[in-house]
Image (cartoon, rainbow, N blue to C red):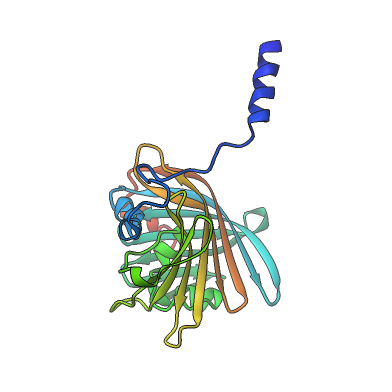
Amino acid sequence: MVAALIAAAVTSACGPPPPVQRQGWAAGAGEIAGVLGADFAAVQGLDDLTAEARLTLTHEQGRNSLAASMLFRPPDLLRLDVQGPLFQHVLSAVIEADTLLALVEGRRLALQADDGLEYFLGIDLGGYDPRWTLLGVVLPGEPDTARVRLPGPGRAVVPVEASPDLPPRRLTLDLHRGFVVGEAVLDDSGEILWSRRLQRFRRLPGTDVYLPRSVRIESGGRILELEYGKVRLDRGLERAAFFTGLR
């Protein structure tokens, strides 16, 4: 008993564990281009992923906090289920390739995948894939290293050039940990269309995949926050499991 109390006291005195650092990352010396897309590539190696989350939406009418669960099978099959108090069904949505199927308020809808967040939440992603947006994964891109800024200790702001599929972006890189912790997607005039803040990274067990526990998406006064809890990998999810109740 005494030994257990001493161990607990030592653990408490040590405080929380230090933030995760990307393996092989030398503080401030890593290749920026290597970080961009590293987790995107690693996630492709998973068979499937299931996750629990707390979803909070802040908008003009107030703030709603809901329970959510996610199924994901790379590269392009994702299901999101959202429940309100007392397990009340709010939304079930499946994105496959460029199509979104949803069940909301007893109605079945079919939309373009890129239009999903705008239709339900008023957040225009400007062509960014909603699957990677919700998971907190940064899409690959070509950094403009000639225009990198260092706004403060351990931070770098990295412009990313536009591509045929995406508008220009501006990323904030944690030079100590080796993670992109902020992303702003820009419109044609250089104004922010929407932005993400990515925090509390963890390495998924047995993999080279790093994902944030906290994803905050902001656009035009609307804020969508996802706080991820338990994540499970490679459970052998069949495609049919993603469409249960939707067809």
Q: Position of residue 225 (x, y in %)?
A: 58, 62
Q: Position of residue 151 (x, y in %)?
A: 52, 65
Residue closer to the observer: 28 or 136: 28
Q: What is the number of callouts on the image?
A: 0
- Tell me where residue 66 sits by quadrant: bottom right
Q: Quick one: quadrant of the C terminus?
A: bottom left
- Judged left or right of residue 25, residue 194 is right
- Judged left or right of residue 101, residue 165 is left
Q: Quick one: quadrant of the N terminus?
A: top right
Q: Position of residue 54 (x, y in %)?
A: 59, 54
- Judged left or right of residue 130, residue 144 is left
Q: Residue at x 42, y 48 (%)?
A: 27
Q: Residue furthest bottom?
A: 189
Residue closer to the observer: 244 or 170: 170
Q: Is residue 89 something that shows in the picture?
A: yes
- Judged left or right of residue 74, residue 245 is right
Residue closer to the observer: 225 or 155: 155
Q: Is residue 112 something that shows in the picture?
A: no
- Tell me where residue 236 sits by quadrant: top left
Q: Residue at x 39, y 72 (%)?
A: 147
Q: Position of residue 60 (x, y in %)?
A: 68, 77
Q: Residue at x 46, y 83 (%)?
A: 190
Asked if residue 147 is positioned above or below residue 243 in the image, the reply reads below
